[in-house]
Amino acid sequence: MTGGSSLLARRTAEALLARGDEVVMLQRGEAPIDAPQVRGDVRDADLVHRALDGCDAVVHAAAKVGIVGSWEEFRSINVDGTANVIAAARELGLSRVVYVSTPSVSHAGHSLVGALADPPVTGRTDAHYAESKAVAERLALGAASDALPVVAIRPHLVWGPGDTQLVGRIVERARAGRLALVGGGTALIDTTYIDNAASALVAALDAAIPGATCVGRAYVIANGEPRPIRELIEGILHAAGVTAEPKVVPLRVALGAGSVVEKIWARAKPDEEPPLTRFLAEQLGTAHWFDPRPARDDLGWRPTVTIDQGLAELAAWFATH
């Protein structure tokens, strides 16, 4: 398991350990889990090779996420790192690879309604994360064969207790009075509770065998419960015990402001995350939910935790943290 310090990788490793699998973790920092750990960077080909030696399979979740950083940094970690994992898996004769991707690889700025896992869109210059992950997914799936089955999983907006990305940012901005709803928060967006995302990676690991339908394909994973983004945000804030009235920003205004802000931030505060970018405005202001049937049919996977159950778990976590 690469990227072991992330919430998704850690929860997936816990699920694998719970069923009796042996897990080796590879990440730059220390992962809070009782399993052998190799600390280092996926850009180090020799280190990746040593970490995978003796393993039967690999779940590659390590990545640079977010919107701060140069293209070279995103490319070297997300693309070169993936190339190192694939090369080591081939050389060591691993039986399968599960590549953790993102639905943003195929998001081109328009609404996605009941969409399938469309091919990755490349050539974008305004979203280094999405572009680098799209290139890396093509590389990973292009390596798929009977000798090395590869499947890509695109978990959609993963959240849950301990999440510092979606949940953490929403709560932080609400407390600071800086939370805004693009387009009034009416866009229907599906999300994935953390336990469901982890079980999907486990299901992909089990399904990726020679000749399987899933080999060489990508699957979007989500709860299958599209909701207006305002409703989801309100649920997260309620779970956190935070009262806030987000500002409403029309989509056109958000798109224009995002374009201006990202240019200013790149010059004035290159090491800080801008409050808004055009790509982020597109993500927040347009619908994106997906057809759950391919993952069900090909991976035998179904979500087991509903959004409401997840919000209850989140509330319980906030009550003790």
Image: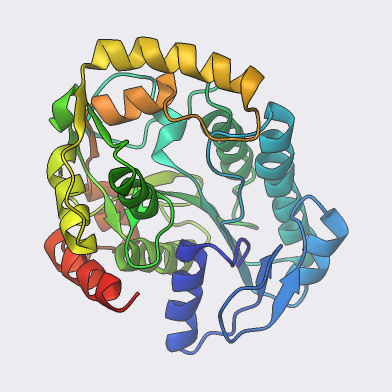
Residue 48 occupies which quadrant of the picture?
Answer: bottom right
Residue 184 occupies which quadrant of the picture?
Answer: top left
Picture coordinates of residue 234, whole percent (x, y) = 15, 48
Is residue 72 in view?
A: yes
Q: Residue at x 16, y 63 (%)?
A: 306
Query: Left or right: where does residue 208 sit relative to residue 316?
Result: right
Picture coordinates of residue 164, whole percent (x, y) = 43, 56
Picture coordinates of residue 246, whole percent (x, y) = 20, 36
**Residue farthest to the front, as pictured:** 176
Is residue 223 positioned above or below 50 on the image? Answer: above
Camera-side residue: 313 or 301?
Answer: 313
Camera-side residue: 118 or 271?
Answer: 271
Picture coordinates of residue 126, whole percent (x, y) = 53, 19
Please give the count of numbered marks on the rendered protein.
Answer: 0
Is residue 273 positioned above or below 15 on the image? Answer: above
Query: Left or right: where does residue 288 sit relative to residue 73?
Result: left
Pick the quarter of the image with the C terminus.
Answer: bottom left
Query: Left or right: where does residue 70 sit relative to residue 128?
Result: right
Pick the quarter of the image with the N terminus.
Answer: bottom right
Colour scheme of the picture = rainbow
Is residue 175 positioned above or below 185 on the image? Answer: below
Camera-side residue: 58 or 178?
Answer: 178
